[in-house]
Amino acid sequence: MTEMLAALLGALVGGLLSAWVGSRQTAKVLKHETDLAATERREAQRVDEERRESLAADQLITALADFVTVNRDDEHRSESFVRLPTTEDVHRERNVRASKLLQAGSSYAHALPEELRERWDALTWMVRFNQSKQPERSEELRRRDASDLLNYIEYVRRSLCAVSEDYPMPKHFPAPDVRREDRRAWGFKPQEGCNEPDLTEWHFSSRLIGKVTFTTGAVRWYGPNGLVVDLPPEPSDTSPADV
């Protein structure tokens, strides 16, 4: 009888141990699968977020290209970006381009990384500021405003390209201060200690602004004064996206 009880007790303990070990193994497997699924979800979310950010950046690069491309002579350059005495058609064209740029920002800027969204917001503030009448503001300052705006656009464009093409984001610089006394354009030959990028080389270059890829594979760079440069189609394993 004692031997039977011992055998029964042994079987019971063995069964409990087996069940405990099995449950531990099952819990480990379930935890591993749960962690793996969570990792896969996070990775999928990261990839999706990067895709949305890249798409938004592409669209805003194109919007900037459209905004800065004007078919006018150099003497009308400032009037095409800030409110200065000029002909009604220049005012009308500037208003239309500014409206389209602001609409593009409303549609896509929310998808940008926070740091870049702040730069875009500063840019749209500058566009609105330069659209306002402000009769007390001198023409000299207005022309500086135009250079500030174009230079800051280039800085923002480079920031957008960093997201679109996945390379390091340019260092953060505060937007031009419209109240400063310095007549020098922001980003042009900055003096030592100035907290702004040095865009001097770009300022003297052909100043290509926006890269736009079409469904045909053709690539164009847009710049001020209607500058358009055709480049050969870029090789790609997939069909180019619409822009």
Image (tube, rainbow, N blue to C red):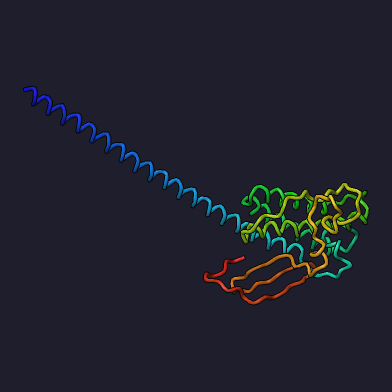
**In x, y percent, where is residue 202?**
79, 64
As drawn, the residue found furthest toward the bottom would be 232
Q: Nearer the viewer, residue 193 or 68?
A: 193
Point out residue 70 in the picture as x, y percentages from the top left corner.
79, 67
User: For residue 19, what is the image quadrant?
Assistant: top left
Query: Which residue occupies the extreme front position in the image?
Result: 3
Which quadrant does the N terminus fall into?
top left
Give the x, y percent position of residue 83. Answer: 86, 56
- Residue 76 location (% of width, % of height): 87, 66
The quarter of the rendered structure image containing the C terminus is bottom right
Identify the residue at image location x=75%, y=68%: 208
Residue nearer the viewer, 88 or 45: 45
**Residue in the picture at 72% in, 74% down:** 229
Number of labels in the image equals: 0
* Quarter of the figure with residue 55: bottom right
Residue under the image location 88 percent in, 64 percent down: 87
**Residue 82 is at least partly visible in this image:** no
Residue at the limit of the structure toward the top, as seen here? 2
Horizontal side, residue 212 vs residue 236: left or right: right
Residue 193 located left or right of residue 64: right
Q: Is residue 161 left or right of residue 201?
A: left
When the figure is inspected, residue 8 is found, relative to residue 106, above or below; the finding is above
Residue placed most toward the observer, 79 or 205: 205
Q: Nearer the viewer, residue 187 or 79?
A: 187
Q: Is residue 174 visible?
A: yes
